[in-house]
Image: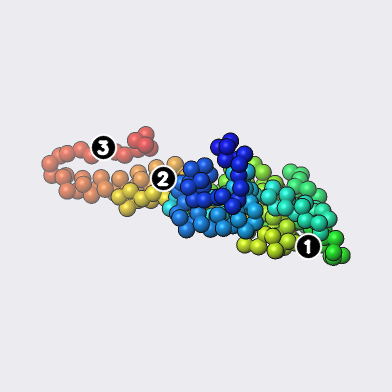
């Protein structure tokens, strides 16, 4: 790997190298590898420095994503770039929207969006983007995944920043997307003998006492039916109670 980094040239990038050294490369199809190589050559990207990489979930097609750091690096190299501002949009305790500077909010504020503003030397009006939390939060089992639970402001700020830089420099970033913009697909519940496993929301809302009460009633009805059938034999049906669960 060290040798690959030291002698890397985008012109020498090929499928064999990608499959051998790049995370996820071995799982990608030849068509997906060709797309990645062409994107790297077109934009002079180094996949071994995590400027561009694959995201692949199960048997779904691989997604080619660009790192936020690559957007930043390329923007700072552009002579027309004059700076960028990033922040979050929150709802305060009085129900009023506020635009915070940076990816920071207080516990009393509800995160609802993020914004970014790119300044260019050749125009007075900066490129402005605002994105919604609900549109980009990545879910798992009905809840925000680990990164979006622990760092929601940071993650949404990355989305806004990446979009603003793409809008400001379409010739350089057209057709690319950041990892934060590709949600992990919801896992389909397993099914055994026609019964699907419960998802996280169903597990958390499960009421054991209610379930036990309903099962007791069902078993009592079944026992009563059996008792009527075997009554002549003198067989005793034990009473069903909550202790049986």
Disc marking residue 105: none
Going from N to C along the chain, the mark reached first, 3 or 2, is: 2
Distance from the alpha carbon under mark 2 to that under mark 1: 56 Å
At which x and y percent is residue 144?
A: 59, 48
- 219 left or right, relative to 176: left
> Image quadrant for the N terminus?
top right
Q: Disc 3 versus disc 2: distance between alpha carbons? A: 20 Å
Q: Nearer the viewer, residue 158 or 65?
A: 65
Mark 3: give few (<14), some (14-19) or many (20+) Cα within 10 Å.
few
> What numbered label is drawn on residue 211?
2
Which residue in the protein does label 3 denote?
Answer: 238
Residue 100 locus on image (x, y percent): 80, 51
Asked if one can make out residue 151 in the rendered structure from this viewpoint, the answer is yes
* Quadrant of the image occupied by residue 89: bottom right
> Which element carries disc 2, helix, strand or loop?
helix
Above or below for 185 versus 23: below
The residue mark sitting in front, 2 or 1, is 1
């Amino acid at each position: 790997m060290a040798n690959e980094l030291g002698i890397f040239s985008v012109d020498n990038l090929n499928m064999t190298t990608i499959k051998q050294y790049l995370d996820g490369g071995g799982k990608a199809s030849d068509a997906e590898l060709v797309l990645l190589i062409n994107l790297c050559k077109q934009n002079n990207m180094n996949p071994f420095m995590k400027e561009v990489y694959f995201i692949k979930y199960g048997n779904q097609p691989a997604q080619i994503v660009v790192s936020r750091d690559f957007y930043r690096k390329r923007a700072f190299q552009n002579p027309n770039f004059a700076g960028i501002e990033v922040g979050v949009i929150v709802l305060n305790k009085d129900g009023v929207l506020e635009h915070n500077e940076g990816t920071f909010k207080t516990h009393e504020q509800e995160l609802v969006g993020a914004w970014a503003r790119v300044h260019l030397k050749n125009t007075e009006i900066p490129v402005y983007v605002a994105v919604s939390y609900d549109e980009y939060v990545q879910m798992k089992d009905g809840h925000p995944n680990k990164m979006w639970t622990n760092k929601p402001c940071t993650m949404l700020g990355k989305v806004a920043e990446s979009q603003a830089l793409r809008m400001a420099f379409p010739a350089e970033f057209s057709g690319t997307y950041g990892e934060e913009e590709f949600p992990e697909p919801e896992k389909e519940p397993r099914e055994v003998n026609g019964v699907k496993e419960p998802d996280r929301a169903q597990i958390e809302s499960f009421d054991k006492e209610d379930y036990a009460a309903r099962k007791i009633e069902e078993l009592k009805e079944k026992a009563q039916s059996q008792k009527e059938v075997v009554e002549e034999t003198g067989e005793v049906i034990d009473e069903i109670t909550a202790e049986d669960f």
